[in-house]
Structure formats: C-alpha cells, structure tokens
Amino acid sequence: MTFHFEILGTWGPFILEGLWVVLGLSLVSAFIGVAIGLVCAFLKKKKIIGTFLSFYIDFFRGTPVFVQLYFVYFGLPALMGLAVDKWWVSIIVFGLNSGAYLAEIMRAGIEGIDKGQIEAAKALGVMQKDIIKDIILPQAIRSILPAIINEFIALTKETSVVSVLGINDLMKRYSFVVAKTYSPFEPLLMIMVTYYILNKILSFIGSMIERKLKYD
C-alpha cells in the first residue's frame, strides 16, 4: 500500500473548505438549540404546554438525528407535496435536536439553584424577569457550561450526515475526491484529523471560558 501525499496536496484545500459549512451549520443550529432549551426549561412545568414540550423532548432524544433529517427532508415533502431547502431543513432539524438535549441540561442547572435566593428576591419585590436575568441564568450557565460545550462538540460531529442531502460539507467533498482519485484512505484520514483538531480546539475554548466564569 502506498500513501499518496499528492492527493492531499492537490485536494486538501478543496476538502477543508467544507469545514466552514460544518462550523456555520453547527453555530446557527446551536443558537437555535440554546433558545429552544431555555424556553423548554422554563415552560416544561406548565400543565398544557409542558405536556407538548415533554413529548417533543422525548421524541427528538429518542430517535436518531439521521432519521429525523430524512423524515423532514424526504418524508414530509413527499406527503405534503412541498419543495424544501436542504439548508433550512438541516438547521431546523439540528436546532430542534440540540434543543431537546439542552432543555434537560438547562432544567437540571436551573433546579440546582438555591431556592432561598429566588424567594428572597421575590420578598424584596424584584420582578420575575430580573430574577431570571440576574439570578437564575448566570448561576445556571456557570454550572452547565461544560455540558453545553460537550453538546456543541457533539453537534459538530453529527452534522456530517448532511452530506446525504447534497450539502457540500467535508464528507460530501470526500465523496467527490474519491470519485476523482479512486483513493478513499487519504481524504478520509484528513477529514478525521480535521474533526479531531476542531473538537480539541472547541474543548480548549470551552475550558478557558469555564475557568474565566469560575474566577469572575
């Protein structure tokens, strides 16, 4: 077996351009997931809407994201006769999937806050929105930040399935390179190393933020 360095030299930059697709899709989906997670964490205890949110969380946590992506992109449009955009479908599916996991993480963080602080704030006449903004969220985020970072790292890896929709990410570019070179090993090794380095960098950034929040 011969390792073809020329393949990486020729096709490496083309493959790495897909990294921007991974980062863009992951960041937008993560923002959506955080927003959904916060809403679910605060509203899940409500009787009517809480039942709906519990079903949503269980459904998205209990089914593979690959199947969810296929269902929304291929299944629903076939049933309803609609044309959908693969980018928006990917963002929505990954946002909803991430939101379901973050909802439980955030709920645990919120419930871990000393209830005495909240009761004291209410007794002093602090408005509910200020209690959430100034007491609940800062403490909850400090405690759950490592879990949020881990969820974002998992999200960057899960987005690799969007290649089946034709989105030009790392894996889609890999397929193109293999079709041109008939050599799968070199480009696939490059993609694995790229994902590894990316997530090491994200873990390092997360640790820095965590340490800063801990000592502020």
Image (tube, rainbow, N blue to C red):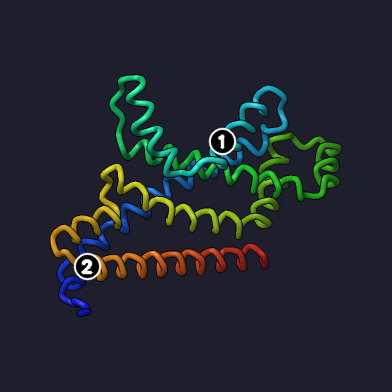
Quarter of the image with the C terminus in it? bottom right
Q: Is residue 157 toward the left or the right of residue 86 in the image?
A: right
User: Can you give x and y, in whole percent of width and height, for residue 124 in the image?
Assistant: 84, 39
User: Residue 54: image x %, image y %?
Assistant: 64, 33
Q: Which mark is residue 59?
A: 1
Left or right, residue 71 beside residue 84: right
The foreground one among 23 and 121 is 23
Crowding around mark 1 (Cα neighbors within 10 Å: few <14, some 14 to 19, many 20+) is some
168 over 188 or under it: above or below: above
Please tell me whether residue 176 is drawn above or below residue 209 in the rendered image.
above
Q: Residue furthest bottom?
A: 2
Cβ–Cβ under 8 Å for marks 1 and 2: no
Mark in front: 1 vs 2: 1
The image shows residue 13, relative to residue 121, as above or below, that is below
Horizontal arrangement in the rendering, residue 82 relative to residue 101 (left or right): left
Residue drawn at x 38%, y 48% as measured from the top left: 25
Q: Quadrant of residue 119?
A: top right
Front residue of this view, candidates 125 and 188: 188
Badge 1 marks a residue whose secondary structure is: helix
- The N terminus lies in which quarter of the figure? bottom left
Q: Amino acid at mark 1?
A: Phe
Image coords of residue 113 (percent x, y): 77, 49
Give me the C-alpha separation between circle 1 and circle 2: 39 Å
